[in-house]
Every structure is written in structure tokens, then in C-alpha cells.
Image: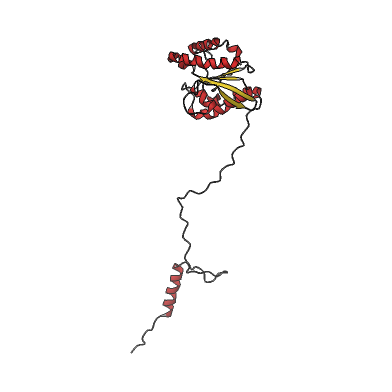
Amino acid sequence: MGISGAFDWRAEAASALEWWRDAGVDVLVDEDPRDWTAREAAPAVASNTPQPVALAEPEPEVPLPATLEAFIDWRFGSGAPESGWVEPIVAPTGNPAAPLMVITDFPESDGETPSLLSGPAGRLFDRMLAAIGLDRDAIYFAPLCAARPITGSVPRDAEERLGELLRHHIALTAPKRLLLLGQTVSRAVIGSDGGLQRGRLQAVNQENGQSLMVATFHPRFLLTRPAAKADAWKDLQLLLEEQAE
């Protein structure tokens, strides 16, 4: 009878060594102990959760020029917000020291050179001034937009910035009276999203004093709605009443 359970230990040893080699054991000894049976850490899975991003520090806000002369040079120069528009920049006209400051929305382009209220609307405006004993030389005339928008209307996304600049312009000029032409200008100065705030005197407080303001229809609107001229005349009379006091 043969011996039960006999085996070739050399073959078994070679088989064991081959298994360890397949498992990644390629050296018999190492300087540092290693757990050959430990599982490797699973690779990190990319998360869909947005990771916080470090925001750049906001640039310090550059203050607006503190004098009227410096503001005019900047506001109606090459650095004006409208300088990238295709239309030329049009500066204010008249005397900044005049008691009445008139604000229109943007320059007209009826002639070869854009100007503040030209053509039929300009002639109607001149008649409106003459009705209260004034002309363009006796007022300070400035635009909300320094250039005519391509669309023919003030861009709504630019109104807030343009209104800020206009209010600073008014504060530096400090006129006794203000005449606002049209709803867009009224909204920029008063900050109301409603209709034209006309038909009454309104006080505007400034660092250099207080101005009395009247809002009325723009001459372009009056050309298309002649019936509104009676209301516009009432608005102009408010300026006459204040001037007489």
C-alpha cells in the first residue's frame, strides 16, 4: 500500500511563488514593511457639485470729477460712456451759470452736425422758450445721452448709469430751476418708473443747494400730439411763477 497524501513540495513551492509574483510581489524583502494584501484606495470620483471659486477683488470705484469743468471734460470727451457709439459726442450749450438748466434725452441728427434739438422739434423748443421770455443763450442746455443712440431711444440698460452722471452734472451746476423734457429724462432724474411726472414744481436737494424742477412733454412728442401743447404751456407757466418770486 502506498503512502497517502504524498506530494512534491518543490512543485508546490514553485506554484506558490508564481502566485505571489502574479499578485505583484516582485521582491522578497523591502526596507519598509508593506501590507501586500491591502486594497488600494479607490480613485476620487469627480463631483458635480460646483466648487467655490475665489473671486477677484473688485476694482475700487473711481470717483466722478468734483468740479464742473473737469466733469464736462471727462463726460463729453473721449472717455464718455457713449464714446463707443457710432454717433459723435455733443456737449452742453449755453451758460452753466444760467438760472435755468434744460435737459433733453439725446442730440438730434436732422442736420449735417448733430446738435441739441434741431429741425422741427428744435424750432418748437425755441418757441417754447420765447413764450417765457428766454432763448438758448439764456439757459444751460444739456443732454442725458451725450450721443444719439442708433435705435433712436435711450437704451434701458444704460439709463441707470446715465442718470447717475446726469444727477452729478446737475449737482455741480446747481441751477435754480430745472426743465426736464420727456419721460426718459424725468425717469433718469426723479427715478420713477411711472409716467411723466409733470404738472407741478418739485424740489431737488443737492449738496450746493436746492433746485425747483418742472417736467414736461418733449417737443418731439408735441409734434405728434398737438393737443398736449396746452398742458406743456401750463408746465412752462410754473417756471414763470417761480421766476417772478
Extreme residue toward the front, this view: 245
In this view, the residue in front, 153 or 241, is 241
Give the colouring mode of the picture.
Answer: secondary structure
* Total marks placed: 0
> Relative to 57, is 146 above or below?
above
Task: Classify the position of the C terminus by image quarter.
Answer: top right
> Which residue corresponds to the image point at 48% horizontal and 48% vertical from the top-left?
50
Instruction: State left or right for residue 167 relative to residue 183.
Output: right
Q: Position of residue 183 (x, y in %)?
A: 49, 23
> Relative to 237, is 82 above or below?
below
Q: Position of residue 191 (x, y in %)?
A: 52, 28
Which of the 4 quarters of the picture holds residue 223?
A: top left
Extreme residue toward the left, this view: 1
In this view, the residue in front, 112 or 101, is 101
Task: Classify the position of the N terminus by image quarter.
Answer: bottom left
> Which residue corresponds to the image point at 57% horizontal and 14% vertical from the top-left?
240
> Which residue corresponds to the image point at 56% horizontal and 43% vertical from the top-left?
55
In this view, the residue in front, 162 or 133, is 133
Extreme residue toward the bottom, this view: 1
Q: Position of residue 80 (x, y in %)?
A: 58, 25
Q: Position of residue 84 (x, y in %)?
A: 54, 25
